[in-house]
Image (tube, rainbow, N blue to C red):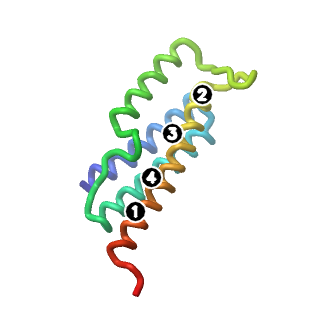
């Protein structure tokens, strides 16, 4: 399991580095997504250790759903690398990446609160 997690983290670093260098995404957005992913991963790994259960999915998104979103994004990128948002022309992956980063940060906070409550119920203060 440890090797799998390390490979996942290295893969995320490689993916975000490649996206940031591609010109289809600003490096700041790529780094925000990477930090959010690593935060969510770390929370999952700590919960696995402390609660004794590993959850593959967080919320409604699991690995399969994320892959489907990546495929859809790549297909949209073939049409145009830009998106119009509130009258502004932005890189498509910047918009999608910002939404993904915010969702991952929010999910990490919500899941951490849920896991903290579960740990408290297992061992309440005296």
Disc 3 or 4, which lies upstream in sequence? 3
Disc 4 element: helix
The secondary element bearing badge 3 is classed as: helix
Rendered-image quadrant of the N terminus: bottom left
Q: Quadrant of residue 121?
A: bottom left
- The residue that appears at 63% across and 26% down in the rendered structure is 91
Left or right of residue 32: residue 112 = left
Please, which residue is most extreme toward the bottom here?
Answer: 126
| Label 2: element kind | loop
Alpha-carbon distance for marks 4 and 1?
Answer: 12 Å
Which callout, 4 or 1, points to the residue nearer the camera?
1
Instruction: Find residue 40 and name its label.
Output: 4
Front residue of this view, candidates 97 and 11: 97
Q: Is residue 46 above or below residue 27?
A: below
* Residue at horizontal 57 percent and vertical 37 percent from the top: 99
Q: Nearer the viewer, residue 83 or 13?
A: 83
Residue mark closest to the camera, 1 vs 2: 1
Q: Which is more foreground, mark 3 or mark 4?
A: 4
Question: Which residue, given by chain and number where applicable, does mark 1 sit on?
Answer: 115
Taking the spot 64% from the left edge, 21% from the top edge, the residue there is 83
Q: Quadrant of the C terminus?
A: bottom left
List x then y, in percent, for residue 80: 58, 15
Q: Are marks 1 and 2 in contact (CB under 8 Å)?
A: no
Kindly report the distance in space between the C-alpha atoms of the residues bearing marks 1 and 2: 38 Å
Give me the C-alpha separation between circle 3 and circle 4: 18 Å
Residue 23 is marked as: 2
- Could you tell me which secondary element the residue under label 1 belongs to? helix
Q: Is residue 120 above or below residue 85?
A: below
User: Badge 4, how many Cα within 10 Å: few under 14, some, many 20+?
Assistant: many
Q: At which x and y percent is residue 98?
A: 59, 38
Q: Earlier in the sequence, mark 3 or mark 1?
A: 3
Which quadrant holds residue 102? Answer: top right
């Amino acid at each position: 399991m440890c090797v799998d997690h390390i490979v996942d983290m290295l893969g995320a670093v490689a993916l975000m580095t490649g996206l940031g260098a591609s010109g289809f995404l600003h490096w700041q957005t790529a780094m925000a997504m990477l930090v959010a992913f690593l935060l969510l991963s770390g929370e999952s790994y700590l919960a696995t250790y402390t609660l004794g259960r590993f959850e593959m999915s967080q919320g409604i998104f699991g690995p399969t759903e994320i892959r489907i979103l990546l495929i859809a994004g790549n297909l949209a990128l073939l049409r145009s690398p830009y998106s119009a948002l509130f009258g502004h022309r932005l890189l498509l992956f910047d918009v999608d990446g910002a939404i993904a980063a915010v969702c991952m940060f929010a999910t990490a906070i919500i899941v951490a609160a849920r896991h903290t409550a579960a740990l408290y119920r297992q061992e309440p203060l005296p």
